[in-house]
Amino acid sequence: MQLEMKINNLRKDLSFMKQAEIKPNYKALGDKHGINQRTVKKYHEGYEGKPSKRNKASKLDKYKEEKYTSS
């Protein structure tokens, strides 16, 4: 939960810098928010976070179809 607050505050700072047309200093923002500078850069470049649900098929789906067709 604390990480979410840090990320939200980081997003606010990044949006302010974008509106003011200021290039962010990743190291300084990372130190300010207690986040790695690479994470700051990732969010500056448009990362939205992990999706809440994965869209991946099951490994057993191919056998599911065979089961119904062979019966």
Image (cartoon, rainbow, N blue to C red):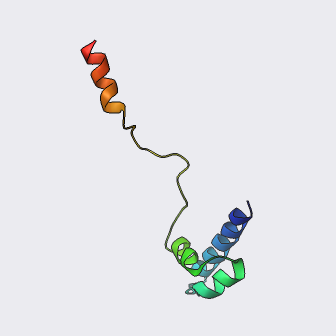
Farthest top residue? 71
User: The N terminus is located in which quarter?
Assistant: bottom right
Which residue is found at the position 70% from the left and 77% from the top? Answer: 33
Look at the picture and state if 31 lies above or below 2.
below
User: The C terminus is located in which quarter?
Assistant: top left
Residue 8: image x %, image y %?
68, 66
Look at the picture and state if 4 lies above or below 57.
below
- Name the one closer to the observer, 21 or 54: 54
Residue 9: image x %, image y %?
70, 71
Look at the picture and state if 22 lies above or below 38.
below
Which residue is found at the position 55% from the left and 71% from the top? Answer: 43
- Left or right position of 52 against 59: right
Farthest left residue? 70
Q: Quadrant of residue 19?
A: bottom right
Which residue is found at the position 30% from the left and 24% from the top? Answer: 65
Residue 24: image x %, image y %?
58, 85
